[in-house]
Structures are given as structure tokens and as C-alpha cells.
């Protein structure tokens, strides 16, 4: 005599895990990853090349790097400071890029994944308001 078992009810954690796995093949998620790589890969290569130039010049072009520009400031010091400037510049560029090309799509995917109602642009979710208070 067959025994009918009630359908297995999934916990909210199991449902969220399934939605998360499914999200990895969603076209919008793949587009978000593509947009991120379009910025991150070239910037990473450019910054690494710039840093490698600084290191190689410090090691093999000592005469050039020790050239005094004014006072006690030489080319090596300017290159070193420009490393910090370029790091902050890339951070600013990424922030602008993310605001234009990533944030809205990421927010909508996250809200869908967590089963929340979308929050209009420029407004914070209720839990964000509570945290900041």
C-alpha cells in the first residue's frame, strides 16, 4: 500500500540558494559581469604596466630616476607620488562607471534575488534608513 508523503516544503534558505544558483545563468547577471570586466580588466592591466614601469625604471634607469627636477624632488619621487594619484584616479573613475553602468542593474538583481520590492533610484530601502539612524 503506497504511502502518500506530503510535498517537501523548502526552507527560505533553500529557496534563496536555488535562486542564487539560477541567477548565475541569468542574462542580466552575465551582462553585469561583462560590464564589470570591461572596466576592471583594462584598468588592472594599465595600472600593473604603470607600476611595472616604475619598478623597472627604479632598478635599471637609476640615472634618469635620480634626475633632480627642483629642490630635493627627483623623477623617482614624482613617479612614486603619481602611483598614489593614479590609484585614487582609478577609484574615482570606477565609482563613476559603477554609478552609470553597474549599480542599477546590480540593485535590481539583488532585490529580485532577495524577494524585495525594487527601491526607486535615489531612495534608500527601509532597512538602510534604520541602519543609518
Image: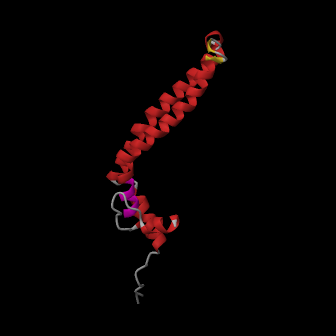
* The N terminus, quarter of image: bottom left
Does residue 11 show up magenta in the picture? no
Q: How would you classify the magenta stretch by its main secondary structure? A: helix
Q: Residue at x 42, y 64 (%)?
A: 18
Spot occupied by residue 102 in the image (x, y as percentages of width and height):
38, 48
Magenta range is 106-112
Is 100 above or below relative to 51? below
Q: Nearer the viewer, residue 128 or 33?
A: 128
Using residue 83 as the reference point, say whether residue 97 is left or right of it. left
Residue that extends furthest to the top in the rendered view of this protein: 63
Q: Looking at the picture, how far across and down is residue 36, in whole percent?
A: 41, 43
- At x 59%, y 22%, the residue is 78
Display coloring:
secondary structure
> Looking at the picture, how far across and down is residue 83, in whole percent?
57, 29
When the figure is inspected, residue 52 is found, relative to residue 125, above or below; the finding is above
Q: Using the image as rendered, state which of residue 103 and residue 40 is in the foreground.
A: 103
Q: Residue at x 33, y 61 (%)?
A: 120
- Percent across and percent down for residue 14 are 47, 69
Q: In the visual, does 101 lie left or right of 45?
A: left
Q: Which residue corresponds to the image point at 41% horizontal and 84% vertical from the top-left?
A: 6
Q: Please identify the quarter of the rendering in which residue 116 is found.
A: bottom left
Q: Is residue 14 left or right of residue 54?
A: left
In this view, which residue lies farthest toward the bottom?
1
21 or 92: nearer the eye? Answer: 92
Amino acid at each position: 500500500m503506497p504511502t502518500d508523503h506530503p510535498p517537501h516544503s523548502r526552507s527560505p534558505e533553500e529557496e534563496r540558494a536555488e535562486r542564487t544558483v539560477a541567477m548565475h545563468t541569468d542574462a542580466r547577471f552575465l551582462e553585469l559581469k561583462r560590464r564589470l570586466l570591461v572596466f576592471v580588466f583594462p584598468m588592472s592591466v594599465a595600472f600593473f604596466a604603470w607600476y611595472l614601469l616604475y619598478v623597472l625604471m627604479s632598478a635599471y634607469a637609476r640615472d634618469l630616476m635620480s634626475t633632480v627636477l627642483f629642490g630635493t624632488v627627483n623623477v623617482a619621487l614624482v613617479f612614486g607620488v603619481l602611483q598614489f594619484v593614479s590609484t585614487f584616479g582609478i577609484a574615482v573613475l570606477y565609482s563613476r562607471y559603477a554609478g552609470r553602468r553597474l549599480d542599477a542593474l546590480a540593485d535590481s538583481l539583488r532585490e529580485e534575488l532577495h524577494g524585495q520590492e525594487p527601491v526607486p533610484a535615489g531612495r534608500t530601502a527601509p532597512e538602510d534608513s534604520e541602519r543609518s539612524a
